[in-house]
Image (spheres, helix red, strand yellow):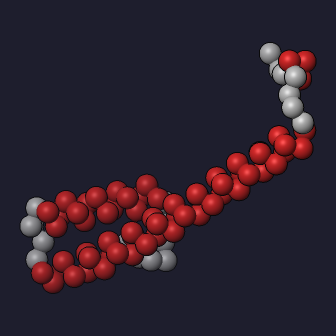
Amino acid sequence: MTDKKKISYSQAIGELERIINEIESESINVDVLTEKVKRATHLIKFCKGNLRTTEEAVKKALSEIEEKSAGEGPETADDRDF
C-alpha cells in the first residue's frame, strides 16, 4: 500500500496487526523485516495522529456543550423533553 493512498484508522490497525503476526511467526526474512518495521512505524504515527485529532475534536465538542449548557441557566422540570 503506498503512502499516497488514503487509509482509514481501522485499515491501518489491521495492517499493523498483520505485520506484527508476520514478525512474531518469524516467517519473514531480514530484508523484508526492515521494510515491514518502517511501514509499521509509519502506521503507528498515522494512528497516533488520528487519535490525537479525534481526542481534540471530542474535547472541543464537549466544551461547546458545556458552554451552551452554562449559558442557558439551570434546567427546570418544565424545560425537559419527555
Residue at 77% x, 45% y: name it: 65
Q: Nearer the viewer, residue 16 or 56?
A: 56
Say if residue 6 shows up in the picture. Answer: no
- For this view, does 77 lie left or right of residue 22? right
Q: Residue 28 in the image: x percent, y percent?
A: 12, 71
How many marks the image carries: the answer is 0
Among the 4 quarters of the image, the one containing residue 53: bottom right
Relative to 64, residue 25 above or below: below
Relative to 37, residue 59 above or below: above
Give the quadrant of the N terminus. Answer: bottom left
Q: Nearer the viewer, residue 78 or 11?
A: 78
Q: Residue furthest top?
A: 82
Residue at 43% x, 55% y: name it: 10
Among the 4 quarters of the image, the one containing residue 19: bottom left
Residue at 71% x, 56% y: name it: 60
Q: Residue furthest front?
A: 74
- For this view, does 62 lie left or right of residue 69? left
Q: Residue 30 in the image: x percent, y percent?
A: 12, 81
Relative to 81, residue 21 above or below: below
Q: Residue 78 in the image: x percent, y percent?
A: 90, 18
- For this view, does 27 lie left or right of residue 13? left
Among the 4 quarters of the image, the one containing residue 74: top right
Give the quadrant of the C terminus. Answer: top right
Say if residue 41 shows up in the picture. Answer: yes
